[in-house]
Amino acid sequence: MTEQDSATRPSRIAVTTRDEEPTPASAPQAPPASRRAGTVLAALGVTAFSLTFPSTAWGLEGIGPWSFVTLRGALAALVAGGCLLALRVAIPHRRHWAGLAVVGAGVVVGFPLLTTLALQTSTTAHAAVVVGLLPLTTAVFSVLRTGARPSRTFWAAALAGAAAVIAFTVQQSGGALTTADLYLFGALLICAAGYTEGGRLAREMPGWQVIGWALVLCLPLNVVGALLALPHESFHLTGHSVAGLLYAALGSQFLGLVVWYRGMAEIGVPRASQLQLAQPLLTLVWSVFLLGEHLTVAAPLTAAAVLVCIAVTQRARD
């Protein structure tokens, strides 16, 4: 194959140099096999995220909120940094650092901190009300940031799924609103920005490197925060608190985001974000086994409605 032939042949992977960056409009459509793999990876990320609130609730049984968040980020950064160092991964180009800073602010610092503060007074079911809005918020951020234009069918299914999730989670929490909602709505916005920027960067570098460098970037902040918080907060290592901290750091903060960003790179931010419609329901299921919460008969009905909406959004053409 000549250079001229290869230049005219469409490719799934955008090739860039250090000085140029592909635009979303020119990004080719991934083949069906790649999209199926991306959907599986994104679904694994959602499953990992669904355990975040229960693990945080466990961690807060013995660790103060500020200590928990900073230790969580520091532990994840040490693992990520070790992987980057062992594999001799090159430092990202300077044009990527602004995006990595957005990812760090959104998913490494902002979302963990705000949701942890909220979970001091809010149940996992109540927190899931806001998490149910995350797919729509992420899709909106994606439209603004990447120029994506999902179809009307996509938006209709997304709105229907979000409405079903919100109705279910509000019913589970008794319809009560607390001051923790301010934390949760702030977490929703900043996390959506981090997801969108991370999904964009994952088209140019492996997803695990996106979250890895974001964690390393935030490591100094987390170390300083831990040193300031630990002397002033409770710190009792129990079985639950240790398990919660380790899972939040390694499962949610690192491994979950690795597969999540890879999945978003394959199927696109808007479609991947709709898989998160199932996250609140999964969180409630885990809460039954881990936190002793009880679900009503509305759970399977809502789960069925959400699965239908997810199927529609995954099939809707952009």
Image (cartoon, grey):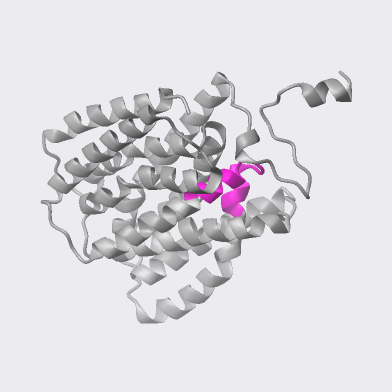
Question: Which percent across, then down, holds residue 146?
Answer: 55, 44
Residue 285 vertical position relative to residue 154 in the rendered view, above or below? below
* Residue 208 covered by magenta stretch: yes
Question: Which percent across, then down, holds residue 69?
Answer: 42, 65
Q: Main secondary structure of the magenta part?
A: helix
Question: Which percent across, then down, holds residue 25?
Answer: 61, 36
The residue furthest right is 2
Q: Residue at x 63, y 42 (%)?
A: 206
Would you identify the image quadrant in which residue 300 lies?
top left
Would you identify the image quadrant in which residue 179 lies?
bottom left
Q: Nearer the viewer, residue 218 or 154?
A: 154
The answer to whether residue 59 is seen in the rendering is: no
Q: Residue at x 49, y 33 (%)?
A: 41
Residue 160 falls left or right of residue 292: right
Q: Nearer the viewer, residue 188 or 73?
A: 188
Residue 233 vertical position relative to residue 285 in the rendered view, above or below? below
Q: Residue at x 45, y 80 (%)?
A: 228
The answer to whether residue 144 is seen in the rendering is: yes
Which stretch appears magenta?
195-212
